[in-house]
Each structure stands twice: as structure tokens, then as C-alpha cells.
Amino acid sequence: MARFKALQTNENGGRFETSLMERDTDELPAGEVLIRVTYSSLNYKDALSASGNRGVTRSFPHTPGIDAAGTVAESSVADFSIGDEVIVTGYDLGMNTAGGFGQYIRVPAAWVIKRPVGLSLREAMALGTAGLTAALCIDKLEQAGLEPTDAPILVTGATGGVGSIAIALLSRLGYKVAAVTGKAEQGDFLRKLGATQVVERSALQAGTEKPLLKEQWAGAVDTVGGDILFNVVKSLQRGASVACCGLTAGTHFQANVLPFILRGVNLLGVDSVEIPLVVKASMWDKLSVQWKLPNLDDLVQEISLEQLPEAIERTLAGQQTGRMLVRLD
Ligand code: NDP
């Protein structure tokens, strides 16, 4: 048994408060692999969990953190030995299983991936679920026929975790990128990531009543949903696709069939959570070699567990820029 530090969200008369606690590894759920977590990262879903969203976390007290990278401390399976460096993202981690905002996690071996040789644990969590999701979006777009052309790829929620890494990856792969943001002051950050054009979010919120908009984008990564997604669908070039992965602007969107039947556009759903481990592993391999980002440090701010509650508030308010890497020392 070991004592360790963890962030814990408690419910108190309908209010949710997140603070640092001491816990024992004995209190962690059953599982084949005990991991000493070195780094985690903050994703929008963690902010939802920490604010009591029952769609993410059913019962409290709870330790959020859908991402974790660290070293195997105990293993009851032959696939993992003490000292192995590993990554866990998604499945139930941080949802209803105590997550990466604690210095230890215990999980099923079926959730665990060995760190790819080309990525450090720190780099893996600089990417985290956001990076994995951005990679899955781009992979799906390329499977649907996307290749670099003169027309840009649109990325919504551009300063967010998924959006910022999608921009960096697309730029690295030779695409032109139009970044949609609500943060006009972050133009320089987005251009440094590789955006060739910055579009104000309000431009994508207008024209919802029109059945079709001017054909502009060779493809799109949409991290926000809502009316913006509908306008993205209506402004895709003939035969182009949008990878839909997020909901910060809303879970619903109104649509009409015209973009689909007149322009043959495609709406591609992306899930990074419950997909088979082998698919996650193949994306991590890509992210560690062919798609490795040279500028990961520009994307992340490193914070401690103590600084997380404030970062969670900023994320919920849509004010966060780039990725938050969480150090668990
Ligand atoms: P972040 O909080 O890092 O970024 C979200 C960004 O969305 C913000 O930075 C902001 O960017 C934009 N935004 C915020 N509020 C609004 C709003 N009301 N309307 C329009 N845009 C808004 O989140 P993540 O990058 O971690 O996640 C993005 C989304 O993707 C989330 O909905 C998350 O749940 C989802 N997701 C889904 C996954 C999957 O497997 N399908 C995996 C990972 C994430 P800006 O100011 O630049 O416009």
C-alpha cells in the first residue's frame, strides 16, 4: 500500500468542489496494472467530470483525469512488468474509474499501451486524448480521400486542445489550415502553430438559415458541434468531409440534406474513447514517427495538481488556450 496525492471532486449539497486529497492505493479499483502516474493532461471532458456532469461521471467523490502516462508499479499479467513506461487514455479512466489526476491509477491491462519509442511520457501527455483525437480525425479524413490541395482545411475550436494539435498536425502534413476561433487575440498563437488563415467564430455562426453556403473548405475538423457544425457542412467543397468530434458549442445541430445530396459531402464521426486498443496504438505509433510534432513545447503549459482547479474553471469558461500538461510529482 502507498499513500499518494490526488485531486478529488466532492459533491456537497448539489455543489461540486475539487481539491487535493491524500489517498491509499488500497482504495483504487481492482485491476491488473497499478501505474505510478508521471504526467496527465487536462481535457474538456475532465472539466465536465469535475463540474458534476452525470453524462461523464455518475457518482462522487471522484478523481477525474482521462489521460495518464507513467511507470508500472505492479502487474498481474505477463504483458507488463514493473518499470515499463505506459500510456492510458479513454475507456472508463477518469469517468467512473479514478483517473490520472492522482499519482496512482489501477486499471485493466486491456486499457494499457506501452510508450512508443519515439515519444517521451511528457510528449505523450502533451498530446494526450486531444492529440489522439486530432490524429483520428485527420486519419479518417485521409481515408475519405483528403490530400493537400490549394484549398484550406477548416479547424473549429482552434485554440482548444484538439483544435490546436489538429492545426499543428495538418500543417506538418502539408495542408493549408483555416483556424476558427472565438479568441481574436490568439491569431499569432494560431499562425505559429501553422494556421495560414484565422477566421472569427462569429463568421461561422451567421447564415444558419441558408440551405447552402459558398464552397470553401477541402475538409474540416470540427471540435465544437452546434450551429457551427451545420455551417461547416454547408460550406465544404464538393465531395469533401468533416470529422466531427466535439460539442463545446452544443450537442444538437440542425441540418438539411442539400449539402449531402447536391455536393456529396460527408459527415464523419470520431470517437477516441472506446475504439479498440490496437487502433489507439497505431495512432500513437504515427504520432511518434511520421506525424511527430517538432513544436510540442509551444503547445503546452505545464501545471501541478495544485494549479488544476483553476485551469478547470478556465476550460469550462472556454478561456483555455492550447494544452495543459499536468505534472504529478
Ligand atoms: P478545450 O476546452 O481545450 O477547447 C475547446 C475550444 O472550443 C475552446 O478553446 C474554444 O476555442 C471553443 N469553444 C469553447 N466554447 C465554445 C462555444 N460556446 N462555441 C464555439 N466554440 C467554443 O476542449 P478539447 O479540445 O479538450 O475538446 C474539444 C471538444 O472535443 C470537446 O467537446 C470534447 O468533449 C471533445 N472531444 C471528443 C473526443 C472524442 O473522442 N470524440 C475526444 C476529445 C475531445 P476558440 O476560442 O479557439 O474558438
Image: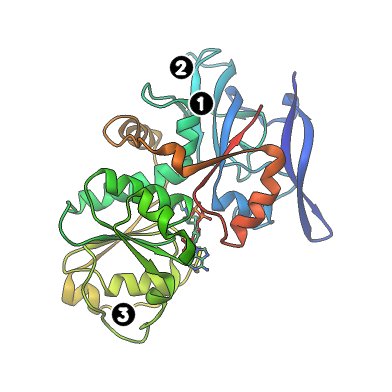
The amino acid type found where label 1 is placed reads Ala
Does the residue tagged 2 have its C-beta within 8 Å of any atom of ligand 1? no
Q: Mark 1 packing: few (<14 Cα in 10 Å), some, or many (20+)?
A: some
Residue, disc 2:
79
Q: Is residue 214 visible?
A: yes
Label 3, label 2: how far apart the Cα atoms are? 49 Å
Tally of marks? 3
> Residues at badges 2 and 1 in contact (C-beta under 8 Å)?
yes
Residue, disc 1:
109
Name which of mark 3 and mark 2 comes first in the sequence.
2
Front in this rendered view, residue 62 or 20 = 20
Does the residue tagged 3 have its C-beta within 8 Å of any atom of ligand 1? no
Q: Secondary structure at mark 1?
A: helix
The amino acid type found where label 2 is placed reads Asp
Residue, disc 3:
256
Residue at 21%, 73% in the rendered image: 215
Residue at 34%, 30% in the rendered image: 288
Which of discs 3 and 1 lies nearer the camera? The answer is: 3
Q: Mark 3 packing: few (<14 Cα in 10 Å), some, or many (20+)?
A: few
Label 3, label 1: how far apart the Cα atoms are? 44 Å
